[in-house]
Amino acid sequence: MKELSLHILDIAQNSIAAGAKHVDLTVEEGEGLLRITVADDGRGMSPEFLASVTDPFTTTRTTRKVGLGLPLLRLAAEQTGGGLRVESRLGVGTTVTAAFRADHIDCPPLGDTASTVSLLAQGLPEGMELTYTRRTPRGEFRFDTAEIRAVLGPDVPLSEPEVAEWMRGYVAEGEEGLA
Ligand SMILES: Nc1ncnc2c1ncn2[C@@H]1O[C@H](COP(=O)(O)OP(=O)(O)OP(=O)(O)O)[C@@H](O)[C@H]1O
Ligand SMILES: [Mg+2]
């Protein structure tokens, strides 16, 4: 994948598919590293499944036999001299951490994180919330769909085009201050 934000979209979809109530995305930069963390409280994985989950032939998909989300992220991270860690407990949740060496020639650009976060927020299933934390040496920005909902009230869905565009702009502006 050309951009890391596409991986983020992909890995967050796994959390949604796992029936999580909360998904927490974090993108941190510093000391030559770029770290992406996707943590959820979804159904989790058994130790046996977890042991083989970054292998492309492991999947619970029924439409095709291979799952590629985690193996592709692992490959992208390892190509920069970084790596992937997946921690999971059945019935508790899953945390995926990908570390990239930011100065490596093969490190993909982060891409449009603001659109990615807005897209995920727009498509959240009922009863699910998303947080996004961006940390750089200059500071931290946080976005939380629960807070946005509290401001908008119960009658305005996050999928409303004006709201989606507002969320994108809000994240983009917040991140600009950290560049
Ligand atoms: N956050 C998660 N919680 C629970 N199970 C997960 C999670 N992430 C991945 N899995 C399990 O690991 C499998 C492999 O995930 P992966 O993203 O690599 O492939 P996929 O989702 O099956 O297919 P693709 O991402 O290519 O559409 C999933 O099918 C799912 O069973
Ligand atoms: Mg997947």
Image: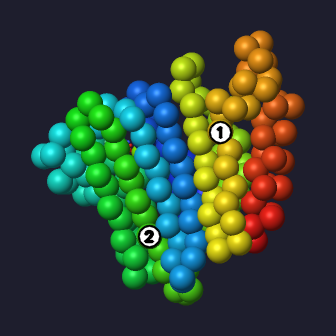
Q: Is residue 129 above or below residue 97?
A: above
Cα–Cα gap, marks 1 and 2: 23 Å
Q: Residue at x 24, y 41 (%)?
A: 89
x, y percent for residue 179:
75, 71
x, y percent for residue 52:
19, 54
Asked whether the viewer can see residue 116, the reply is no
Asked if the residue at label 2 sits under 8 Å from ligand 1, the reply is no
Q: Is residue 69 above or below residue 83?
A: above
Amino acid at the residue labelled 1: Asp
- Element under label 1? strand
Which residue has dot 2 on it?
99
Q: Nearer the viewer, residue 156 or 12?
A: 156
The part of the image, by quadrant, that contains residue 134 is bottom right
Q: Residue at x 15, y 46 (%)?
A: 47
Bin the neighbour count of mark 2 within 10 Å (Cα to Cα): few under 14, some 14-19, many 20 and up: many
Q: Is residue 79 above or below residue 96?
A: below
Q: Residue at x 54, y 83 (%)?
A: 32
Residue 144, numbered label: 1
Q: Is residue 94 left or right of residue 143?
A: left
Amino acid at the residue labelled 2: Ala
Q: Nearer the viewer, residue 9 or 176?
A: 176
Q: Is residue 120 left or right of residue 57?
A: right
Q: Residue at x 54, y 49 (%)?
A: 25
Q: Earlier in the sequence, mark 1 or mark 2?
A: 2
- Element under label 2? strand
The part of the image, by quadrant, that contains residue 149 is top right
